[in-house]
Every structure is written in C-alpha cells, then in structure tokens.
Image (cartoon, coloured by chain):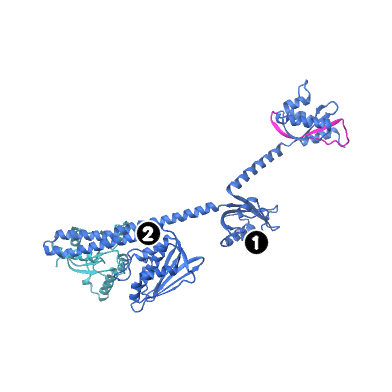
Chain colours: A blue, B cyan
Amino acid sequence: MLNDIQLNSILEDFDIAYWKINLLNKEVSWSEHFNTLVGKPELSESNFDYFLKEILHSDYRYDFRIYFEKLTEENEAFSIEVKLKLSNGKYRWFECRNLINKDNNRKTAVLLFVNIHQSKRDQYTIEENFFYYHETAQMTNTGGWYIDIVNRNIYWDNVTKKIIDCPLDYQPPYEEHFKFYAPQEHATVMSAFEKCEKYGIPFKLELKMRNLYHKDFWICATGKPVYNEEQKIIGIRGVFQDINKQKINELNLQNSLDIIATQNSRLFNFAHIVSHSLRSHSSNLCLIAELLKEAKTDTDKVELIPNVTDISENLDSAINQLNEIVNKQTLLRKERRIISFEKALSGVMASTSSLINRENAKIVAEFHNLKEISYIPEYLESILLNLITNAIKYKHPGRKPVIFIQTYMKNETPFLEISDNGLGIDLDRYGDKMFGMYKTFHENLDSRGIGLFITKNQVETLGGSISVTSTIDVGTTFKIKF
Amino acid sequence: MGQKVELACIIDDDKIYVNLVKKIIEIKKLSNNLLIFKNGKEALDHFKLILENANEEILPDIIFLDINMPIMDGWEFLNEFIKIKNIFDKKITLYVVSSSIDPRDLERAKSFNLVTDYLIKPIELKKFEKIFHRNGHAAA
C-alpha cells in the first residue's frame, strides 16, 4: 500500500488537493497542496471560515455551505463545481466532491478538489462554438452531411433534412442518394463525388437538388475528403446551403437585365432607323428647295412640283410605318392568355381572305401535336399574319403558293413552323439581315421591309427566338421557338 | 471652267433623289453622261460586263453609292467592287452617300480605302459642283 507521502505526491501530480474533515468537531485541515494553491489563512481564523470568505467565489457560498452541512450531518454525497481564488489572485474552476466512505468511518470525511479549469474552458468554447454554428446554420439555411464510404452510410443533420424537406427520422439511402439531385446535375455531381472519393479533391458547386416530392431547388454544396490515420479516404463531408431564393432572384435579375439590354439596343437601333427613314425624305425636300431657287423659268419650277407631291406622300407613309411599329411594341403591356392556334389562324385567314383567294393560296395546318399556347393573342395573330402574307408575297411565279403550318413540343418547349414553296432566299448572303428593318431582298413593289423586323421583335419580347432555313426556288421555313 | 466630268454614276434606290440629282447635273452641266442603277447588284453586273469586254472607256469617273438598297446594299457592293476595281486602269472616285447619320455607318465607310468620302444627304448644290469640278478632266 502507498503511504501518505506517496499518496500525497500522486495527488499533487494530478493537481488534486483535499480536505480532511473531523466529523466530531467539524474541524477542517488542508492538504499541503491545497495550502500552496490558495495560501494560508491568518492564525486567528479557522480554515473553513477563511475558505468561505476569501477563497470560494461568492456565487457558490450558499450551495457549498448546504452541501457541507449535509455531508457532515447526514453523510450525503458532496459534488459541486466551484470557482476558487488562487494565491495569485485568479479564479479557477474546481470540482469538489467527497471521497466515498467505504468502511463506515464516521469520524473523518475527505473532500477532494480537482482542477477542472481546462476542461471547463474547453466545454465553454465548445458550447460557444456550438451556439454560433447553430445560429449560423439556422440563419443561412446551411446543413451538414457526411458520407461514410467504409460502412456505406449517409448522415444528414437536421438542417439538411429541413432543406431537403424530409422527416427528421428519415434515413437517406446510400445507393440512391443521387436521386436527390435534379437529373441534369447527375453527371456533375457524380464526377465531383468520385474525384473527392478517389483523389481527395474538394468541391464547391451550385446545383439543383430534388426533394422527395420532386420539387427542384438551388443549393450550394461543398464537400471535402475525410482521412483515417493511414491517410486513406474513408468519407466525404460537407455542407448544403439552401440558396434557392437568392438563386431565383439572381436568375430573375439576370433575365430582367437581359431584357432591358435587348430593349435598349432595340431602342437605339430604332432611333437610328427613325432618323434615317425620315431624313431621306427631308433631305429630298431640301434638294427640291434648292433646285426651286436655282430654277430660272416658270416651266422649270412647275416641272419640280410633282416631286414635292411624291416626297410628301413618301414622308407620310414612312411616318405611318413607324407609328405601326410603335403601336405593335406597346402591345407589350397586354397579358398572356391561353389561345388555340386554330382560332388564331382562322382569324388571320379571314382578314387575308382576299389575298389568299386572289393568289389561290393553299394553307395546310397541323395543330394536333400542340393545340394551344399561353401567349399574347395579338402577337400570335400578327406573327401568323406576317409570315403568311410574306409566303404569299414571295411566291414562286411558276406555282400556286402552298403554306404548311405545324406546331409541336420539343424538349418541353413549344414550336411553330411555317413552310412555303415560294421563291426562297439566299441565306448565305442575306441570312444576318433577314430580320433587319427596311431590308428587302426582292424587287417587289409592296415589300416594305418591316414585317419580319416586327415578327422577330414580338417573338423575342416574349422570350422566344425565330430562325429561318431556305433554298432558292424551293421554299422557306420559319421556325419559332416560343 | 473647262473641267467637266465625262461620266458620273449614281447607285441609289430612291427615285426622287435620283431624279433631283439628275436635274442638278443637267442644270449645272456637271457631267456629260450619267449612269443610274437602282441597287448594288445592277451596278456590279454592269461593271463586270465592262471588264469582260475590256471596254474601259465607258467606266465612270465618279460613283455616288447609297447604303440602304434592296437586293444588294452599298456595303455588299463595296466588298465586291474591291475585287474588280484594281483590274481597271482608270481612276474611279467613289463617294458613299446616305441619309444615315449613324456614326457607325460613317466609321464603316471610312474603313474602306476606296471610299473617298462619306456624304450625308442632302448634299448642297455648291458641294455637288465642287465635287464634280475636283474630279473633272481638262476638257478635251
């Protein structure tokens, strides 16, 4: 057995001090180590009073007294964490408990003081960190996850479960965890996970995830490898941040920016077009005025008059055309409605019946693949009208015009195609100008060069696009992606 | 003055403008002859024909080229004309004439070496006279 000295030195090594309490007279004697820790009381004072008054932090004075009484009176277990003021004047945490009395010795009790300051501080740090982590996770909607590669298990914390919108006791399936990503992300996600698992390459991705109810949402995911002691990768851990709201706002904003940018450039072009189309007439007027000044005889002057009439007519029709474009643009404020292609087409055919009959044009429509669309009715009619009249205007001289119209869905997007058997156009030469304003490609008296410009504008305003394929002497096909 | 342009050429689809210029040239006796084309293609075909027949005497001394025209616009004409211009011995002065005041058009016209200047419509009578006189030959 160890003697007292050996025992004392062991306790000292572990930074454990103790009291011996005489249960008969309640006198307290301190171990040497306790003496060195807190310092000695003045001779007149009892250890116990001095301890309560000078050493023990005032917060624990009441509890300590009660515990002490219970221990001395009723031999009840003593266990309390207290702050003691050491000889250097600083408070430190100690766990104070009694040594269990095995041999029913009712004469003395031993009270141990174990320095727990470091672990107490660690505990505080942990609690504090946990608090910050918890608050941050809640506020930023960030959840943690861990994939245990060795045991083939997936762990999600509660925030992750909340993001993915599954019950708190849901156990994500290891083999099928890819089903929680939108199909279009599978390739990206698999390659990121594989690279992380095989080569330890961390990842940070913006992805669309899919919850149990097939709703997609945006998240930001980070993943890092977890190594064991042999530096082998045994898992991947990381966080998911729910960025759906931000991402959707961002996409909306980008979308609005794109629309504004295109509108802006359209306006800019339009301003130049306006100035150009009006200027050509005003400059002719200036020329006439100069010529009138120069004209020497009345006959010379009279000869110039018909020119003035022509110019004023041209100017008037130019202004009307511009007005027409502006009017079409202001339809923008109208709202989309579900309209049937059949109905839109019959409206257009009624208004162009004289042209259709005169040219003996045949219009074949196939709308069974896609019968209706949510669109601005006036736009759809104007688009059909422009493309149909174009097809008839530029018909092949040797054939009756035939126009084939069809609608269909492709990749969840509605399409409209209008094909004709007309003149066709050399797209290598005119392709980039097809939809420009005042661009005419045939020597046709009634071509004004604004129809396709308007059509393209309308399609693009509603977020679609228009493309064209054509073969000279065979025909032209316009394809609208709504 | 003693200086007169032998043959001037206008490539423009604006009939009224062409008529007025014709009148100016007649009244001011600026050129003996006038060639008129209503788009770039017609003009180009004509020049190609001259090239085939090696008949340079009927080449114009001066060309006024519009930009916005159907079938073949001024830019396309310039790109085609570059290819054949150097085959001719005759010096041909070319002006781009347009009612466009878009600075991009001006820049683009200036980027062609064979374009002497970019003239904005309307061109004053005095300016017309100056241009013709500058490019005229000593009367034969």
Q: Which of the 4 quarters of the picture holds residue B59?
A: bottom left
Q: Is residue A426 magenta?
A: no
Please provide percent x and percent y for residue A98: 81, 34
- Local secondary structure at mark 2: helix
Residue stretch rendered in magenta on the structure: A88-113
Taking the image as shown, residue B46 lies to the left or right of residue A51, namely left
Q: Which of the 4 quarters of the picture holds residue B25?
A: bottom left
Query: Dot 1 surroundings within 10 Å: few (below 14), some, or many (20 or more)?
Result: few
Q: Identify the residue at the far left of this view.
A: A297
Say which label, 2 or 1, has the lower sequence index. 1
Viewer-nearest residue: B80 or A479: A479
Viewer-nearest residue: B89 or A291: A291
- Local secondary structure at mark 1: loop
Amino acid type, mark 2: Gln
* Distance between mark 2 and mark 1 Cα atoms: 51 Å
Residue at mark 1: chain = A
Query: In which quadrant is the N terminus of chain A drawn?
Result: top right
User: Which residue was labeled with disc 1?
Assistant: A176
Query: Dot 2 surroundings within 10 Å: few (below 14), some, or many (20 or more)?
Result: some
Please provide percent x and percent y for residue A35: 77, 28
Q: Which of the 4 quarters of the picture holds residue A452?
A: bottom left
Q: Identify the residue at the far top of this view.
A: A44
Amino acid type, mark 1: Glu
Q: Is residue A106 magenta?
A: yes
Please provide percent x and percent y for residue A305: 17, 63
